[in-house]
Image (tube, helix red, strand yellow):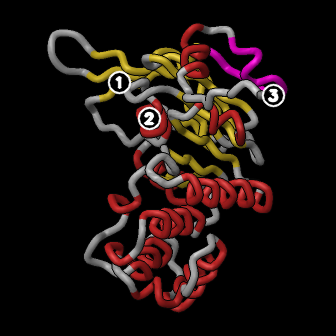
Amino acid sequence: MLLDINELHLSFVGGDEPAHILKGIDLHVAAGELVGLVGESGSGKSTSVRAALRLYGDEAEITGSIRVDGTEMVGADAATCRRLRAESVALVQQDPRAALNPVRRIGDSLAERLVRVHGKRRRDADERILALLTEVGLTQPERRMRQYPHELSGGMLQRVVIAAALSTDPKLVLADEATSALDVTTQAEIIAIFQRQIRERGLGMLFITHDLHLAGAICDRIHVLQQGEIVETLGRPGLFAEARHPYTRSLIESAPALERRAQS
């Protein structure tokens, strides 16, 4: 199992009483799986990802179990967490502009991790980045490597961030609202890239979104999150038909639908 979370509780210490944010989260992602984590803004989706990667400091109290590629993260030392974040798992963030240094060229930003963390020669790193930019569908990849983030559109930058995530050959990808700011056409293209990578590389992916219908169209299994608690888990077939929890039903029914006109 690439990601195995059991009874995960997260509280932030401060004030008179700790704030309980995550309440007994259970989810897992295996190789070749695309698993959805769905909920409204503030439900704890991104918090779950950051907790899984141990990105919170001493202000957070975490109990339960988080196993990434077989290694327990809860209680692990900083070196172990850094190694897993560098080698086994990659994060694709919602805002690609925030993930890239605005004053550095695309090629320099993407190659730095391969050179400094993974010890590759700069020439080898550049070749790897060039191949990945081509793989994720960027035109003129040599030119893109010489450009700055402000010179690329949002959809192009999202492809750059995906290439950066894939550059270290991770086993697990955590996609945190990675398509929510994109237009429908670009969103479909990014999702197709994700699906192809899962199919060809055998990646496991946790796809975090507020869009239940999008998750239902692409995910093997969906966890519905409300106020820091998974209230329902849906699997195929008959994903939406099997939804029973009122919150899940409200998410399904909140999607706009075109009125059907009576045929004359």
Q: Residue at coordinates 54% horizontally, 84% vertically from top-left?
A: 141
Mark 1 is on which residue type? Answer: Glu
Q: Residue at x 62, y 25 (%)?
A: 223
Label 1 sits on a secondary structure element that is strand
Question: Which mark is nearer the camera, 1 or 2?
Answer: 2
For the N terminus, the quadrant is top right
Q: Is 231 inside the magenta-drawn segment? A: no
From the image, state whether disc 3 or disc 1 is nearer to you. Answer: 3
Q: Nearer the viewer, residue 56 or 157?
A: 157
**Where is residue 213 shown, x and y percent of the image?**
63, 33
Mark-to-mark CA distance, 1 and 2: 10 Å
Classify mark 1: residues with Cα within 10 Å, few (<14), some (14-19) or many (20+). Answer: some
Q: Looking at the image, which residue is at 31% across and 78% down?
A: 104
Amino acid type, label 3: Arg
Q: Which residues are magenta?
A: 232-243
Q: Quadrant of the C terminus?
A: top right
Spot occupied by residue 261 in the image (x, y as percentages of width and height) = 68, 27
- Disc on res. 61: 1
Q: Is residue 242 found inside the magenta-colored segment of the image?
A: yes
The reply, left or right, for residue 212 in relation to residue 161 is: right
Q: Nearer the viewer, residue 262 or 201?
A: 262
The residue that label 2 is drawn on is: 51
- Return the residue at label 3: 236
Is there a contact, CB below 8 Å, between mark 1 and mark 2?
no
